[in-house]
Amino acid sequence: MMFEVLRFLVVLGAALLASGGATAALVGLGGGFSDKLDIANQFAPLWLATSVLALALGLPFASGGWRVVTVAAAIVAILIGGFRVAPEVVARFEPKPLPSASERLKVVHFNVYMLNSEPRQAIAWLLAQDADVVVLVEAEGFYRGFAKDLLSRYPYCNGCVERGNWSNLILSKRPPVDHGRFERPDPDTEFPLLGGWSRFAGPGGDFTVVGAHLTWPWRRFGPPQREALAEFVREGQTDRMVLTGDFNMTPWSTALRRFDRSVGALTRRTHGQASWPANRYYRLPGLPLRFFPLLAIDQVYAGPGWRTVSVKRGPRLGSDHYPIVVELAATPKRP
């Protein structure tokens, strides 16, 4: 009797998981028409995994109509989810030939989180990376007092102001030859594009590092923000450009795929490195819970003048995001 009850619960759970996965997958098909429906695609790996689990449970334990419904729904979700997730998995594990070029560029992108709980440890880790350029989002979390050591290593700061918030910064060891900011209210959205750009001189020619913070894609000013950033990129010298940011979009979403196509020669170098949530705690009857990273929303792009050497996710550093560390090497110029 007990075995039959347990079996029924397993079958029921599998059917619910499969149905939920199939529903999310079918809703996500509408992501091309609606940013709100595209929310389902942001979580594609999650419902893909639960559908695989449902199939694994449904095949041996379910029978009759339960089995047909569970297997059919799971297969629908797996096919659609696999189509979205598989290209990122393949790209992430593709072998990266070591470039022979001597010019290297190391960039760290990090959403600090304005209420960062471990600013000293985070700054110590950033200094240990010894990157050429550090792009910070929500840098208010470091406060001015904690940032002295960081600014002593990176004295050139795009975005540091005497008054107001240190929201989005580009820090560098070398002085930029030019720089600019995006924070100008858009008359159509009444919401500024946050971030800026710095251009540096390098052995292989000038290169530009762009940092941006985009809102959630389903908000009404999300599409104008993305288009404004893409337009800036297309109008610049993209061959040696590097674009980083908290885009609040995952690689399996229709929104980010469209953005990928809108930035011209730039190609995304991050492929599914889940960066959120990182270190947020919630208490249920006194028990702290730490969530595993689910969403790959921090991205790095680079132009054809750069080859990818490595892309790594950093540790938890008191933020709700993990940092992303990218090492690039200049593409050898053709004779």
Image (cartoon, rainbow, N blue to C red):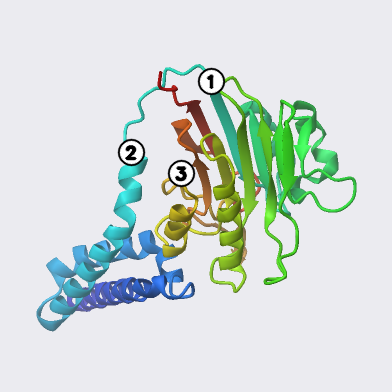
Mark 3 vs mark 1, foreground winner is 3
Which residue type carries mark 1? Glu
Q: Nearer the viewer, residue 77 or 7?
A: 77
C-alpha distance separating marks 2 and 3: 22 Å
Task: Work out which residue is located at the far right of the displayed protein and give it.
Answer: 163
Which residue type carries mark 2? Phe
Residue that appears at 49% across and 25% down? 330
Q: Secondary structure at mark 3?
A: loop
Please tell me how many numbered marks the rendered image carries: 3
Q: Quadrant of residue 152?
A: top right
Residue on which the image places disc 3: 265
Q: Nearer the viewer, residue 6 or 196?
A: 196
Q: Residue 315: x and y, percent?
A: 56, 40
Which residue type carries mark 3? Ala
Marked residue nearer the N-terminal end (3 or 1): 1
Q: Is residue 129 left or right of residue 71?
A: right
Disc marking residue 93: 2
Q: Secondary structure at mark 1?
A: loop
Q: Quadrant of residue 277?
A: bottom right
Residue on which the image places disc 1: 103
Marked residue nearer the N-terminal end (2 or 1): 2
Badge 2: how crowded within 10 Å, few (<14), some, or many (20+)?
few
Q: Is residue 274 left or right of residue 59?
A: right
Compared to 280, does 170 lie above or below? above
Residue 315 appears anywhere in the view: no
Compared to 102, does 55 lie above or below? below
Disc marking residue 116: none
Badge 1: how crowded within 10 Å, few (<14), some, or many (20+)?
some
Discs 2, 3 touching: Cβ within 8 Å: no
Q: Residue 262: x and y, percent?
A: 48, 55
Residue that appears at 71% across and 26% down? 173
Residue that appears at 71% across and 52% down? 138
